[in-house]
Image (cartoon, rainbow, N blue to C red):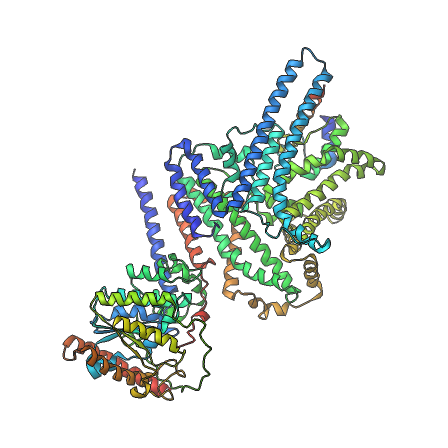
Amino acid sequence: MEALLEILKELHPETDFETEEALVDRGVLVSFDIVMLITRIEEEFDVVIPAKDITPEHFNSAKALYALIEQLQEQDD
Amino acid sequence: MKRTVLKIGGVLLACILLFGALFAITRLLMPKYRETSVEGSLTAEYYRDTTPHDVLFIGDCEVFSNFSPVTLWNEYGIPSYIRGSAQQLVWHSYYLLEDALQTETPKVVVYNVLALKYGEPQSEAYNRMTLDGMRWGKAKTGAIKAGMTEGEDFMSYVFPLLRFHARWSELGSEDFAYWFKAGEPVSFNGYLLRTEVRPATETPLPPVLKDPHLPETSMAWLEKTAALCKENGIDLVLIKSPSIEPYWYPEWDADVAAFAEAHGLWYVNMIEQNDAIGIDMQTDTCDMGQHLNVYGAEKLSRWFGSELKTRYALADRRGDEALDAAYRTLTERYETEKLRLTEGN
Amino acid sequence: MLFTSWAFLLFLAVLVPLYYLVPKRVQWIVLLLADAVFVGFAGVRGAVYMVVTIVTVYAAARGFDALFRRQRETVAAMKATHTKEERKKARLGFEKKRRAVLILCLCVNVGILFVLKYGAAIGRLSAAWLHTPAFGADLTLTMGISFYTFSSIGYLLDVYRETIPAEKNPFRLALFVSFFPLLVQGPISRFDLLGRQLNAPHSFSGERFLSGALRIAWGYWKKLIVADRLLVAVKALCARPAVYRGDFVFVEMLLYAACLYADFTGGIDITIGIGEWFGVTVEENFFRPYFSKSISEYWRRWHITLGEWFKRYVYYPLSVSKPMRTLSQKSRRLGVGVSRRLPVYLATLLVWALTGAWHGSNWTFLVWGVLNGVVILLSEEMKPLYARFHARFPGLTNGACYRGFTVIRTILLLSSLRLLDCYATVKEAFSAFFSMFTTWNWGAVFRGGIQSLGLSWADYGAAFAGVLCMFALSMAQRKGPIRKRILSHGTVCSVCVLLLLIGTILVFGRYGFGFDAGQFIYNRF
């Protein structure tokens, strides 16, 4: 989780990612950011995020995103 | 329960208000045809004259410019009315006659044949001028449906606002002055009085006709008109008004003459009678031979009245109190207007 | 049937009561029959293409479902007897089959759209460059095909990704594909959002009906009072690029911005309102787009469903696709920044080229699309520069003035790009754009020039008043949904608003035979 927050902060230093629940819906994370973010996450966590999981629900909060990463990591095993 | 009633009442009231407003707006936006394009007033004006007519003229501008009912009355005691409007086409003429027959049955119907040359709808604007003034009934719906041009729709006749709404940007003082007021009639029993003199000049002969015959559709409407007259015991007279413009082809003349012969009708091509009538296209036309001015119209009416009287044994109705009174007022108005226009020239 | 035709209004007047009079379980069939009438009215050819799409997409989606089921069964059965690697291999086998079905189905549907959209253009090009006989001149788009093909592909991909299950009843899928209000100008819809609603039973609600009527009336209001009026002037300006230069182009940009907004949002308002009449919530396609502070924000607020579609089904998959990953890895030696950016940038440009191509077969659209992408990428690249600038001059970004500046800048920028949409060739569009800086002729615009475009001052006045109303409503909308506020004042008040809208449309709308006084001057009297 810490690592993820680090990456997010890098992208948008001005946003409080720990509390924000509508990152996509409020337009904080736009499509451009999302793709950049995915590249970073894949490097960092060694997972592959498939296109079908790139939905607003998974990217609206850091918590949801982290849950997705964990789920993907489990699947790999 | 009470709330529902109030709600429905409120909605109904709002709807009534809207329809009231739309009615008022429609009246405001419809052209009044009082200073420009006065011919547009003619169809509606017919209903304002409630006296019976022995002779009814039917046709286009060649009737409403060329015949004077005032002269016919004062010379021969023939009460008459002209149901003509600008570019009134043959189906319009048929239905305007049918419409008139709802309330009166003339003895003679005089039918001008120029419009027979058109077998197709011509102009949306003239359609509106002829039809918007008509009272609602079977005749009006028939007339509308018979001759809509491309892009016209029936709804816009039922709700003229759909047609004239764009006039909001060009409303003039006459639109407000005659918003709910009818005003003085513009015609004298359907006759539009003009006093200008613009002599006819030599015009080159028109091109040879592609089709030497009048269109079948218009002849069919003439047939229907003749049948309608026969049904009602009315004598139908076919005339070609003495106007020399637009050109009346001998081929067309032959078609009409053949029709008249077949139906036992009197057909007179007045262009050939101009010398007998005494019409001089140097002094008696207001626009170089297209329409007669009041001097020409009076001459023509005098000649034609006597022809009608002898051929159809029309009675002299002078002495009938109601008619005398009506025509006295009409004549006064007529003379005043004639004087006003003459002095203006 | 156009939205602005008597036939369409009559169609609705029959359909809506019928929809609520029939038993609820056949409501969706009534709607489907209505679609058939609507599509049939537009021509048999369009109906055939649509049926092909419905049949192929239905079959493919059912195929995916069956393959998923069999995959699960097979893998489960293998659990005891086979190794993990063998199970994975089996899974991959099924995936391959699904992929083949998907590609086949996409080829058919994208193929139809491609041929109809570009067939004529390709025929012309081939005749001009390769001197083959010209072909394809009779290939034209059928009603709604750009919209329903995209909606259907969205459904297909959602089932393929196992996001939603396949619809079992082909007729219920047909209802989603052919829902008639969406065939005019979209929006592109998702089966999980719209399809279920269409097939569900609905009871009549007076308030919802009134609410829908308000939306529909407002849509017509914008279309008939503003859009159709300004279109006359815009068309006149575009038709003579050699004459209308310099400041005429500037006027054209503004008029076109207002015209396109009124036309497109008005059409969508009508669509959404009609949806409400059937108890269906159609997705919003606009969110006050002209209040955007940048082009990329504008594209999240204008034609939203198209942007979402491209993001969901093209942009994301493309950005995370294998070739892109490889490209990213290979470019690592050029620096981390480059390698991270390369896939995003490539995907962005490609998606924008596709978006441009979707709008039309003309080169101008392609250039327009790519330029949009370039502008978005440029502003992304310049972000650090802006940040440094604003750090130097703090306080500049606060306040309404700066916000107003960014909004106006965005409108001007997007309007400049839209010039490509107005003219027939890229050259004409660029020439017109640059003439704004080289030809200085304000006098000509206002000394009668603007009146030569087929509109009177009264028309400009009416359109301007209409634009002011739209602006005022957008401002008011920021404080909450307008219709809800109107409806909260009671039925009578709402009906009055509705009647007022209808009344003003009837008088000030541009429809029917334009009354032309000149036409009435009787030249033979």
Q: Is residue B80 left or right of residue C78?
A: left
- Looking at the image, the residue that sits furthest to the right is C333
Image coords of residue C142 (percent x, y)? 55, 47
Image coords of residue B262 (percent x, y)? 28, 71
Position of residue C146 relative to residue B54, above or below, is above
Q: How many marks?
A: 0
Q: Tell me which residue sits at (56%, 68%) in the image.
A: C452
Q: Tell me which residue sits at (74%, 41%) in the image.
A: C346
Q: Nearer the viewer, residue B1 or B286?
A: B286
Image coords of residue C61 (percent x, y)? 58, 30
The quarter of the image holding the C terminus of chain C is bottom left
Q: Tell me which residue sits at (57%, 37%) in the image.
A: C152
Q: Nearer the viewer, residue B91 or A61?
A: B91
Position of residue C24 relative to residue C470, above or below, is above
Question: Which of the 4 quarters of the picture holds residue C85?
Answer: top right
Question: Which of the 4 quarters of the picture holds residue B80?
Answer: bottom left
Position of residue B195 relative to residue C123, above or below, is below
Position of residue C89 relative to residue B125, above or below, is above
Please say whether residue C237 is visible from this viewpoint: yes
Q: Is residue C419 left or right of residue B332?
A: right
Question: Which of the 4 quarters of the picture holds residue A27?
Answer: top right
Q: Nearer the viewer, residue B204 or C274?
A: B204
Image coords of residue C283 (percent x, y)? 54, 40
Please say whether residue C479 is visible from this viewpoint: no
